[in-house]
Image: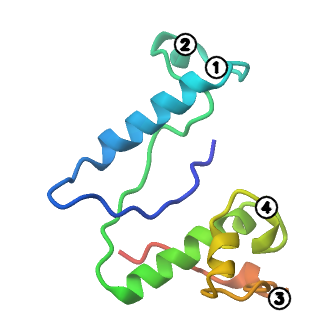
Amino acid sequence: MEQLPSIWTLPAGDVDYSGRWQAIKKHFSKAIPAFEYRSKVRLKRHERGIWQRRFWEHTVRDERDYANHFDYVHFNPVKHGWGTRVKDWPYSSFHRVVAQGIYPDDWMASDHVSSLHIGDRDE
């Protein structure tokens, strides 16, 4: 399973990113029926098959880094084939930021987007 990227601002002094993801996964998983396939390992560990096990954590360094990751978050569904345009993914915050005037409605709608490397890890 692909875990969709997100950008968070934790409260001052809070660095428990892993604990927060764990809590989100737990509460979400308990709220939906368990119909997905689960391997023997996942069953033994009481894990749901809807979540990817690992995640990549990155602390945003500056405004440019934030902008790159903001773009990456919104382009990711297209990158994974869940739509041909950014606005095709109905669960994206893209629709909210279009309404706020941050992105135009047709942002990244051209045919050359597959060659872009938005938000690729450069570390």
Between discs 4 and 2, the one toward the N terminus: 2
Between discs 4 and 3, the one toward the N terminus: 4
Q: Is residue 104 above or below residue 57?
A: below
Q: Are marks 4 and 3 in contact (CB under 8 Å)?
A: no
Q: Which quarter shows the C terminus? A: bottom left
The image's mark for residue 43 is: 2
**Corner quadrant of residue 12:** bottom left
The residue carrying pointer 3 sits among few (fewer than 14), some (14 to 19) or many (20 or more) residues within 10 Å by Cα, namely few
Q: Using residue 18 as the reference point, say whether residue 25 is left or right of it.
A: right
Residue corresponding to mark 4: 81
The residue carrying pointer 4 sits among few (fewer than 14), some (14 to 19) or many (20 or more) residues within 10 Å by Cα, namely few
Q: Is residue 121 above or below residue 39?
A: below
Q: Is residue 79 above or below residue 24?
A: below
Q: Secondary structure at mark 1?
A: loop
Q: Are marks 3 and 1 in contact (CB under 8 Å)?
A: no
Residue at 46% x, 28% y is 26
Residue at 53% x, 19% y is 42
Q: Are marks 1 and 2 in contact (CB under 8 Å)?
A: yes
Nearest the camera: 60 or 56? Answer: 60
* Mark 4 → mark 1, Cα distance in angstroms: 24 Å
Q: Which quarter shows the N terminus? A: top right
In front of the other: label 3 or label 1?
A: 3
